[in-house]
Amino acid sequence: MRRKYKYEMGIAVINGIETEISRKQLEDEGIRAKYKGQTIYDVTKEFKLYIRSRGKSSHFYSRGKNRNNISSKKIYSQRHREKIDTIFNFINAKDRIRICTYYWDYGKRGLETIFSFDNYLLSKEVKQSVTETNYFVADIFGLSKSLNKSDKEPHISIEVIDTHYPDLKTFNYYRHITKNSPLIIVFYYMEFEPFLNQMLNTKSDKTNNGKLRVSHYIQDGSFWVGEERIEEKDYSFIETYNEEINFQIEEEYYNAVQELEIIRIRNKSR
């Protein structure tokens, strides 16, 4: 019976040139010698492969866990990419950034700081493996240049939402990973700009600081609306809000976000 191998094909990249190599070709000692130690990927280019020399049973293998993306590959519109670039450039041009949200006190509006940071390294479309089985692709991802990862210096992911809100699976994944890791996932909605989200310069001429105003983010396993977890927020002001939500059920939690926040804000901003 013919033995089955996990990787039947590899793609070697040498001086920028890609060459396909089949598992069968590795039976040739010359082929093995030629590509041993070279950069080789699987056909999806997600995993780095290595050659295990076993004569007629030589084959490719990978090291580490083969994690999968939590969702299908993101499709970025030109408008979406431009907004990611704008936010990325805005943050990088500032000495310090305050991620903040509006709050109301006796009818007066103010800005509450969720988190402020400086000396962070940021990049776009970053893959992050946080669990044993999955990874996610952050539109903008940042970590402290000190390389610390703590509640004081958490990792930051900014998800720029164009037309599609994260699905149930992705949303639950975000909640799971933030519950077990110092990570803030911020939502910046293009459709709610500047009603809900905007980039603001500080008024002082003495500093080069900026504000990223948001309303929704996920931290510590919860979806936050400003300074309140959605499961603790009072929605009694909504006339149609007359059913108790079981926030222990993931689908009900997700639907509550959609109905009590996203849909309501969408209708209000029109």
Image: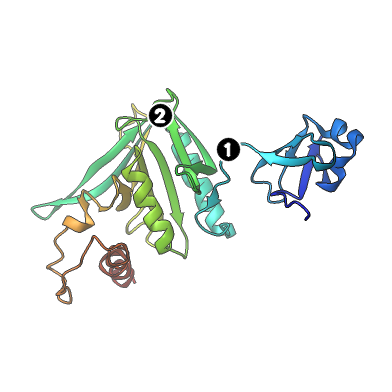
Q: In screen coordinates, is 235 left or right of 100?
A: left
Tell me the CA gap for discs 1 and 2: 38 Å
Q: Report the quarter where the C terminus lies.
A: bottom left
* Residue with the most extreme front position: 1
Residue 237: percent from left, percent from top: 13, 68
Q: Residues within 10 Å of mark 1 (few under 14, many from 20)?
A: few
Q: Residues within 10 Å of mark 2 (few under 14, many from 20)?
A: some
- Find residue 30 and report its image quarter: top right
Q: Report the quarter where the N terminus lies.
A: bottom right
Residue 95: mark? 2
* Residue that label 1 marks: 64
Q: In screen coordinates, is 44 left or right of 198?
A: right
Q: Mark 1 is on which residue type?
A: Gly
Q: In screen coordinates, is 242 left or right of 212?
A: left
* Residue with the most extreme left position: 106
Residue 96: mark? none
Query: Please, which colouring scheme is shown?
Result: rainbow
